């Protein structure tokens, strides 16, 4: 008797509970950052219980169990969807006593395989996501699109005050506006421990960035441990054992990135920005002269010696086999000519080549040789805009990256480069190492990458952009909080529809929420303004 | 406050080790007043080195503050050395076996709180400076190429230039977890700061859990359980600070900056009017109601017992008059009091009554400069804090001219960030550059680096504060002639690596590296 009454009560409660589920007031319909191309949400919401939640492959999916990228992604996203469950504290507010949990399955379907491949230019990142009662269907062309869809789904799930997990009825059709959405880290001015890089890759995936531009060496240090030229890091790193990236470190970074659909684009900048190279590679840099005698200091790489080209060829042979991406960044920026000018052998070479006193011709001569070297290795080159400014005879498929100028100058440069038929990347407005007081994310958000005068074809040559975190004032102590959530502003600009995301004011509350999501996931993202997150950052 | 590091007779003397790159290996921050070092180096062994009370010291093993400090600094000196089982028997040629700590004052004050007075007395030994001396000692120890800890023969006589060397943290605009506050007290000690100015409540939230008025945080905190400081939390902050010779001065800012107070205390704030009816918004504390003063009396009675320091900071800055002006009851009161249209008189009226209330709790008070500017009658021992950037020198001149002690924070608002090495600007500040008599200059007792919370929480606080605040630390501690930027740069670069080595994410000054990078991600 008592038992029957109890069961009847449970039934009643369950009915009431259902009513709550269906008609209950919805406090938040959480958005997705960056904003999907198409999203419709209703207030109808479904309770998710981690104990009966599953991620699975659809029968018609080309990817099935054993797909390395998605198998680990399922595991990763389960933890991101149910943060309490992962931490072993608390759980859903409703227990089995009065509500039999309703199973929910996220079914993933991928049209093409490629589970073991690397994301690259042309990877299809589009996906469709339908969330309905008991089931969500995620359809993607490739595994990379499936990763983007999993990320969106994880951002749709939220917890109410009793810590129960909910997801609203939702339809998403999504694809990126730009195919190249990069983030540059500089590991030369300060060494960044591998863990810092890996957690940056995590946060990149949360914002749907897809290229890690690794500015791995520069003037101050050479942390890349080359198997061909080990002296480069032995002598050029801050410390030959503790401040280097071994081959296995590099592989770890590439593997971690691959699993998140992120390309790793290495940059070996030359002929300038190479002081640290000179320590481990004698006769590589140009000796500067004071009058008739060498001053003891060195300038850019010595472009007059054939040994320089042999060295670069060997180094790039190694680099292009270690890094899988179809592209490689060759730098080519900020070459200071004073040292070249001071050196009598360089002067003689200039005369021999008929360059007169135009040292940009010497630089062009060098870059042309390097571009040929990488082309011979079947890699497409990316270079900083300086190379275009100095020199018109560069291969058509070379990508130019714009890094400087006022907004007007940037627009003009975009016009010029695309008119010449080159693809172009924009990073000038997104130098996040430059800091100021207040909400500077707003400036990053309102950038319009295709707002320049040019034809439709020209605009299509803008393939994306990058946020840059140069390392003068940044190391592992402040990298994460300086990068996030400021980089998120650029992430939305590069992924989302510009018209739908034109209002900074509408973005503000969404970014505030997303910042708290990042904090909840252990990313030390700094606050946008005063306020609080339900779960504050608990590290130091 | 003076401490000395000398050479106790218990040192093992032996073969001299020549150190040519002495300045590369020893770097002290902030720079001591008198400092002599020699190339004679001694090794320190983790298994044999001890920090002990010297014979004749007035403090002994019952002084828990020192016992704790001994352990803390032992760990800083040796904490990174691998402890691999039993050390093999091996004697160094020259080894430092003991650091003897000698307290000579009759009362070692092991259980007291640091105070402004302790600082001013300058008696050549109390426990606070022993803690500071231990910090200096730990900075003298360096690792040689073999990974062995070394210390050079050194003699130091040290005392601070200013007695109030503070850091302000704002726990209202963002809540700061206890862990972050404690960690920053630890870093403060590494930089010889001695005042934690706790701007604990403000408009945005009221995280202080009051026993007398629990509704204040129940309604006014961001969250009544996860975003509050309980009495136990507050106590642990104060004790943690005391152990490091740091005073905790709480600020309860009124009558402005009190939006969050209004949520849990009805009728405390002034209702603003739109035309002839209340608009539903509220302004500063309502200064015309007796209930306001009753509340303040009970509230500050609690505060004065919770916070042990002899001073309370009462704020008094940035009062917006527009709401007061809109309220007909206030207008009437202004008329009755004969204030005319001068609302600063009403503000003074409020502050005056508040000061009387707080005085009756036997506490001294600190206020922001507006209170002085508005000619409120202040007790002789009031500390006026100068924060406005325009006319800083004139203000210092006026405040000290009127005979009040003052501290300077205007040039050290570290929440303002910009690209590059802004620590140099903080370093170059000379607090006594204003026109005034020597007596007036003596009234400048120090300064504070302020990290307001609009854009700062646990995610970015520590790297934003350090090592930028270290620049302020040296300005307030070291002799005024210590101002060479080049020397400061190379010492500060090493000091920042010291902090990183101790697990503190202090950001870099410029391109370069530390032997042990931050790994606490």
Image (cartoon, coloured by chain):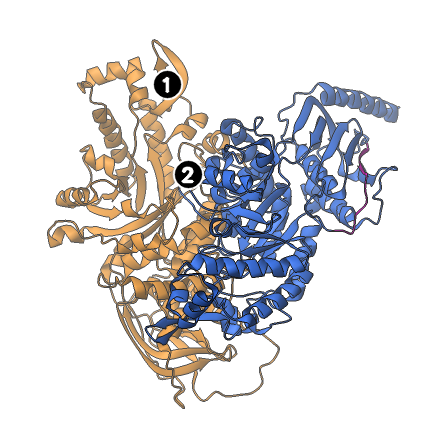
Chain A tint as drawn: blue
- A326, above or below A35, in the image: below
- Percent x, y for residue A489? 53, 37
Relative horizontal placement of residue B203, taking residue B322 as reference (left or right): right
The answer to whether residue A374 is seen in the rendering is: yes
Instruction: Specify whether residue A18 is painted magenta.
Output: no
Residue named by callout 2: A438
Q: How dense is the environment of label 1, judged by Cα within 10 Å: few (below 14), some, or many (20 and up)?
A: many
Q: What's the distance in space between the residues labelled 1 and 2, CA to CA?
A: 31 Å
Q: Position of residue A522 (x, y in %)?
A: 60, 47
Which region is colored magenta?
A: A103-117
Question: Helix, strand, or loop for circle 1?
Answer: strand
Q: Chain of mark 2?
A: A
Quadrant containing the N terminus of chain A is top right
In front of the other: A160 or A34: A34
Task: Between residue A352 and residue A520, name the one nearer to us.
Answer: A352
Instruction: Sort mark 2 into few (<14), some (14-19) or many (20+) by Cα contacts within 10 Å.
Output: some
Q: Report helix, strand or loop for mark 2.
A: loop
Chain B: give its colour: orange
Picture quadrant of residue B279: top left
Q: Residue at x 87, y 27 (%)?
A: A3
Position of A161 compared to B151: left or right? right
* Foreground: disc 1 or disc 2: 2
């Amino acid at each position: 008797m008592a038992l029957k009454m109890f069961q009847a009560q449970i039934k009643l409660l369950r009915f009431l509970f259902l009513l709550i589920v269906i008609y209950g007031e919805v406090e938040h319909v959480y958005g997705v950052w960056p904003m999907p191309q198409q999203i419709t949400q209703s207030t109808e919401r479904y309770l998710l219980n981690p104990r009966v939640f599953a991620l699975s492959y659809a029968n018609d999916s080309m990817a099935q169990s054993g797909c390395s990228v998605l198998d680990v992604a399922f595991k990763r996203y389960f933890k991101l969807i149910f943060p309490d469950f992962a931490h072993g504290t608390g759980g859903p507010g409703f227990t089995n006593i009065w509500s039999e949990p309703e199973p929910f399955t996220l079914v993933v379907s991928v049209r093409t395989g490629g589970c073991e491949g690397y994301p690259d230019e042309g990877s299809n990142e589009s996906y469709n996501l339908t969330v309905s009662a008991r089931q969500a269907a995620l359809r993607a062309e490739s595994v990379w699109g499936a990763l983007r869809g999993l990320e969106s789904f994880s951002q749709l799930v939220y917890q109410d005050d009793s810590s129960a997990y909910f997801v609203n009825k939702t339809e998403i059709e999504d694809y990126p506006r730009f195919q190249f959405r990069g983030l540059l880290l500089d590991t030369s001015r300060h060494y960044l421990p591998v863990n810092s890089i890996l957690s940056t890759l995590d946060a990149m995936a949360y914002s749907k960035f897809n290229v890690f531009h690794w500015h791995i060496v520069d003037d101050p240090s050479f942390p890349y441990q080359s198997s061909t030229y080990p002296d480069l890091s032995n002598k050029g790193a801050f410390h030959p054992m503790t401040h280097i990236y071994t081959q296995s470190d590099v592989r770890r970074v590439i593997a971690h990135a691959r699993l998140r659909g992120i390309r790793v684009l290495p940059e070996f900048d030359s002929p300038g920005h190479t002081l640290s190279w000179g320590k481990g590679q004698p006769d590589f840099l140009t000796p500067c002269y004071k009058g008739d005698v060498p001053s003891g200091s060195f300038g850019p790489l010595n472009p007059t010696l054939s040994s320089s080209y042999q060295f670069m060829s060997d180094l790039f042979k190694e680099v292009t086999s270690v890094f899988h991406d179809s592209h490689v960044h060759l730098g080519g920026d900020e070459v200071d000519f004073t040292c070249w000018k001071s050196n009598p052998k360089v002067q003689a070479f200039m005369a021999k080549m008929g360059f007169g006193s135009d040292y940009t011709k010497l630089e062009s001569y060098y870059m042309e040789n390097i571009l040929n070297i990488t082309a011979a290795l079947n890699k497409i080159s990316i270079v900083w805009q300086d190379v275009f400014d100095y020199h018109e005879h560069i291969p058509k498929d070379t990508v130019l990256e714009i890094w400087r100028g006022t907004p007007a100058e940037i627009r003009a440069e975009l016009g010029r480069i695309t008119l010449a038929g080159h693809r172009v990347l924009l990073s000038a407005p997104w130098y996040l190492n430059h800091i100021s007081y207040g909400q500077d994310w707003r400036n990053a958000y309102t950038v319009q990458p295709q707002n320049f005068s040019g034809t439709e074809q020209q605009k299509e040559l803008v393939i994306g952009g990058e946020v840059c975190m140069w390392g003068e004032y940044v190391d592992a102590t402040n990298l994460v909080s300086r990068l996030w959530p400021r980089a998120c502003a650029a992430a939305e600009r590069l992924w989302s529809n510009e018209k739908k995301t034109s209002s900074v004011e509408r973005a503000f509350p969404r970014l505030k929420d997303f910042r708290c999501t990042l904090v909840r996931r252990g990313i030390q993202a700094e606050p946008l303004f005063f306020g609080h997150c339900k779960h504050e950052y608990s590290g130091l | 406050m003076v401490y000395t590091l000398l050479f106790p007779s218990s040192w093992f003397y032996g073969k001299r080790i020549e150190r040519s790159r002495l300045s590369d290996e020893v770097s002290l921050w902030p720079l001591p007043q008198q400092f002599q070092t020699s190339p004679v180096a001694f090794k320190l062994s983790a298994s044999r080195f001890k920090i002990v009370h010297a014979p004749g010291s007035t403090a002994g093993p019952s002084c828990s503050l020192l016992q704790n400090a001994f352990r803390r600094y032992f760990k800083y000196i040796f904490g990174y050395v691998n402890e691999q089982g039993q050390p093999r028997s091996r004697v160094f040629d020259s080894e430092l076996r003991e650091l003897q700590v000698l307290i000579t004052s009759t009362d070692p004050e092991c259980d007291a709180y640091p105070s402004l007075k302790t600082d001013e007395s300058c008696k050549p030994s109390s426990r606070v400076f022993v803690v500071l001396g231990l910090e200096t000692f730990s900075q003298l120890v360096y690792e040689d190429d073999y990974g062995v800890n070394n210390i050079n023969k050194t003699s130091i006589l040290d005392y601070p230039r200013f007695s109030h060397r503070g850091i302000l943290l704002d726990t209202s605009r963002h809540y700061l977890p206890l862990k972050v506050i404690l960690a920053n007290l630890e870093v403060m000690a590494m930089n010889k700061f001695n005042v934690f100015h706790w701007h604990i409540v403000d408009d945005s939230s009221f995280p202080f859990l009051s026993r007398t008025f629990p509704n204040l945080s129940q309604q006014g905190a961001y969250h009544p359980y996860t975003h509050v400081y309980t009495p136990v939390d507050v106590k642990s902050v104060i004790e943690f600070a005391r152990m490091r010779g740091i005073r905790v001065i709480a600020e309860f800012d009124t009558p402005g900056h009190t939006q969050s107070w209004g949520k849990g205390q009805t009728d405390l704030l002034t209702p603003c009017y739109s035309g002839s009816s209340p608009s539903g918004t509220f302004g500063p504390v309502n200064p015309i109601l007796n209930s306001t003063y009753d509340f303040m009396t009970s509230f500050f009675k609690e505060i004065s017992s919770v916070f042990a320091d002899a001073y309370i900071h009462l704020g008094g800055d940035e009062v917006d008059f527009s709401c007061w002006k809109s309220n007909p009851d206030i207008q009437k009161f202004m008329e009755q009091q004969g204030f005319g249209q001068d609302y600063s008189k009403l503000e003074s009226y409020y502050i005056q009554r508040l000061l009387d209330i707080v005085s009756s709790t036997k506490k001294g008070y600190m206020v922001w400069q507006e209170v002085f500017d508005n000619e409120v009658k202040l007790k002789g021992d009031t500390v006026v804090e100068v924060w406005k950037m325009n006319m800083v020198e004139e203000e210092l001149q006026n405040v000290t001219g009127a005979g009040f002690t003052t501290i300077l924070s205007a040039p050290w608002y570290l929440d303002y960030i910009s690209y590059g090495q802004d620590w140099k600007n903080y370093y170059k500040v000379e607090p006594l550059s204003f026109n005034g008599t020597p007596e007036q200059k003596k009234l400048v007792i120090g300064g504070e680096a302020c990290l307001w919370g609009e854009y700062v929480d646990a995610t970015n606080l520590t790297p934003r504060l350090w090592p930028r605040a270290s620049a302020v630390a040296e300005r307030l501690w070291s002799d005024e002639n210590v101002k060479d930027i080049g020397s400061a740069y190379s010492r500060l670069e090493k000091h920042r690596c010291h902090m990183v080595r101790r697990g503190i994410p202090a950001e870099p000054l410029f391109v370069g590296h530390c032997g042990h990078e931050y790994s606490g991600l």
